[in-house]
Amino acid sequence: MAELTHRSCGSTKTGLQVVEDESTVLEQAFYDDIEYKVRVYVRMALGHGQNRECMDDMYAFIDQLIEQLNADQNPPLDVACQAGCSWCCHLKVEVTQFEVFRIAAFLIETLNEKELEDITKKVISTDLLRRSEEVSEAEHSVPCALLSDGQCKIYPARPLKCRGGNSTDADTCKAYFETGEDGLLSISAPQLLSANSVQDGLAAGTSDVCDKRERSELMAMLGEVLMNPDTIQEWVDDGPSFEGEDGDED
Ligand code: SF4
């Protein structure tokens, strides 16, 4: 299988506003190149029946890319995100189906039966709460069901948008949490746009080889998947509905 590397290295999480300045704007070709490479890689990985390896490679790729982007900035980006800070974990997160299956597989591997049952209920109730009219005005303040004591319970398997939403000022995240006013967040553009490009490439590559192409909000899609554990095992085992064929490169 080809190695996924990058040369030098919109928005949702819903509510995230990309803040650009002259020093952080990168050419669109940079993001197009990421999307293309990811799409080709995903086609090959899924064509070889490597669902899980594919997702783990996506996560390793975006983590390395973000690290490199931060280091490449001069002066290096001062990332405000740190363990225990979770203001942004109250925003909706857009995910692809393969990200959700990876999260579900992680939960099954790390939780006992009772814990899995509890988290499934919590995910479903959070989804319902966020959809309810009473909180529609304050949806930015409903915590993700995967947040526990200020920590992400699925940190190694967290979605692409969570990896790319790096803040340069935690005070702006807190202000958005408290008011929901647009334009408050200070999110680094290259990191978030790179994560978006990886997700676009993942969605396109998946669509090329199997029917798992939908994107949705994390709580909504995770609740559905957790209610159908057979599909999770099928994904882990590269079962029939996830099998693909080698795609031709564009
Ligand atoms: S998945 Fe983890 S990082 Fe993402 S919003 Fe939920 S708790 Fe936060």
Image (tube, grey):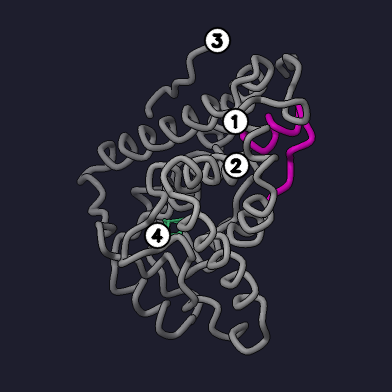
Q: Which mark is residue 236?
A: 1
- Name the residue tied to disc 2: 101
**Amino acid type at mark 3:** Met
Distance (Cα) linking label 4 and label 3: 34 Å
Q: How far from the left and from the top, in percent, is residue 87?
A: 37, 70
**Mark 2 in CB contact with mark 1 (< 8 angstroms):** yes
Most extreme residue toward the top is: 1
Q: Which numbered disc flags the more N-terminal residue, 3 or 1?
A: 3
Q: Nearer the viewer, residue 121 or 54?
A: 121
Picture residue at 69% right of the left edge, 32% below the top: 206
Distance (Cα) linking label 4 and label 1: 34 Å
Q: Which mark is residue 1?
A: 3
Q: How far from the left and from the top, in percent, is residue 61?
A: 43, 30
Q: Which mark is residue 5?
A: none
Q: For the residues carrying marks 3 and 2, which lies nearer the camera in this image?
A: 2
Q: Nearer the viewer, residue 124 or 174?
A: 124
State yes or no: residue 204 in magenta. Answer: yes
The magenta span reads: 201-215
Q: Residues within 10 Å of mark 3 (few under 14, many from 20)?
A: few
Most extreme residue toward the left is: 75
Quadrant assignment, res 238: top right
Q: Which numbered disc flags the more N-terminal residue, 3 or 2?
A: 3
**Mark 3 in CB contact with mark 1 (< 8 angstroms):** no
The answer to whether residue 19 is left or right of residue 28 is: left
Instruction: Look at the picture and state if 171 lies above or below 225.
Output: below
Distance (Cα) linking label 2 and label 4: 27 Å
Q: Which numbered disc flags the more N-terminal residue, 2 or 4?
A: 2
Q: Is residue 21 visible?
A: no
Quadrant of the frame with the C terminus: top right
Q: Which mark is residue 187?
A: 4
The answer to whether residue 102 is left or right of residue 234 is: left
